Amino acid sequence: MSILSYTHPYVREIRAYQPGKPIEETARELGLRPEDIVKLASNENPLGASPRAVEAMQRALLHSNLYPDGSAYELRMKLAKKFGVKFEQTAVGSGSSEMIELLCHTCLGEGKELIAAKYSFTMYPLMCKLFGARYVEVENKADWSHDLQGMLHAITPKTRIVFITNPTNPVGTMVGQEELDAFMGAVPEHVIVAFDEAYIDFAKEKPDTLKYVKRGQNAVVMRTFSKAYGLAGVRAGFVMTTEEIAGLLHKVRSPFNMSSPAQAAALAALDDEEHVRRSVQLVHEGMKQYENAFRAWGVDYIPSSGNFILVNVGEGSRVFRECLRRGVIIRPMDGYGLTQYVRITVGTKEENERCLAALKEALAR
Ligand SMILES: Cc1ncc(COP(=O)(O)O)c(C=O)c1O
């Protein structure tokens, strides 16, 4: 009998997370040089890593023989000071992905439910499978934003977590302060509200969700160093929440869940506001490039507050393949049932030009 029959049935059923197509794999398949390929598929930062973070990592590498500080004291102190919360209200880890997993670990299980918007991060349903919980998906509104009223109505005594992804991936829409306040005023106490704010730095208006944490509500604000800070490869993310919830996260995390180079990089990146400012500006300018082109072509797109844009190209997979042949990796959206769409990460001006040229040719076919 296969070993699989002795393994966890929840785990057997999981379809592993599908990341954007890697550059090296594409280069091998197409016989191209990796440097000739443009990857606009994983919402990474085209400006690169914060130079200060790179230097800090290089210094930290010299001490790689030692275990990292498991409590991430310096980084968490800095976060606490920056965001006006207590040290005990913070937790850090290998990207916000790990923070999502840790939170799910604290309260999901058989008979429990997690609520999220239909068009939000694919890790949430995956986590439900992993922990044997039920995933409750709420349709987005006609303007593609989260239907917070619908999400409120979906709450049952079994609900443990509601994810509000702001801005949401893959559509890029946001919910504003008023709607969030109304939701937080009505959400029952047995539910943890997780604000996944991976893309918040790119948003022109940033609702205050930390105030719910500061008021002692069961809220978790999740952030990442992967996007505006340019450290996706380093794996660094953090949360601010109540002392009670943070305490649980520390119980379920592994003892050294953030490497010393990652802690050093995150610490240095927090001081590199100039890099964040330039990264955000680059995205805003690039977004205009796409919007102008799509408007000129008469192609529908969804206005986005993130560093990516969802565009209706008619046949998403075909256009994805056509762009790939031209060395441009974008993301088909079939996994979400959005077969007409592709998602494009905003890159540098030149990368965007190459992507638009590839798209134009693909659309003309
Ligand atoms: C909405 C959202 N949340 C969280 C993440 C995870 O980011 P990371 O684990 O790199 O911090 C992503 C990644 O793309 C995302 O789109």
Image: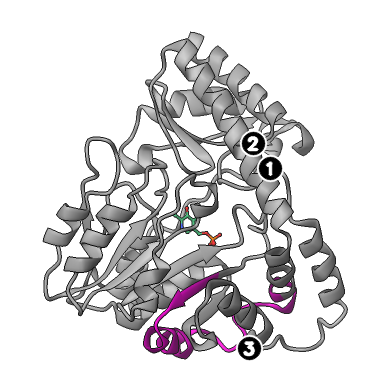
**Neighbour class for label 2 at 10 Å: few (<14), some, many (≥20)?**
many
Q: CA distance from mark 1 to mark 2?
A: 5 Å
Of marks 3 and 2, which one's residue comes earlier in the chain? 3
Q: Is residue 239 magenta?
A: yes
Q: Is residue 125 visible?
A: no
Q: Quadrant of residue 338?
A: top left
SS for tag 3?
Answer: loop
Q: Residue at 44% across / 59% down in the picture?
A: 16
SS for tag 2?
Answer: loop
User: Residue tagged by mark 1?
Assistant: 46
Q: Amino acid at mark 1?
A: Pro
Q: Quadrant of residue 23?
A: top right
User: Residue tagged by mark 2?
Assistant: 347
Q: Is residue 326 above or below residue 251?
A: above
Which stretch did the figure color magenta? 238-263
Q: Position of residue 308 (x, y in %)?
A: 51, 39
Q: Is 225 or 232 nearer to us in this picture?
A: 225
Q: On the picture, is 264 further left or further right than 200?
A: right
Q: Position of residue 245 (x, y in %)?
A: 38, 84
Q: CA distance from mark 3 to mark 2?
A: 35 Å
Q: Is the residue under label 2 in contact with that under label 3 (CB below 8 Å)?
A: no
Q: Is the residue under label 2 in contact with that under label 1 (CB below 8 Å)?
A: yes
Q: Position of residue 309 (x, y in %)?
A: 47, 35
Is ligand 1 closer than 8 angstroms to the Cβ of mark 1?
A: no
The quadrant of the rendering that contains the N terminus is bottom left
Q: Is residue 37 magenta?
A: no
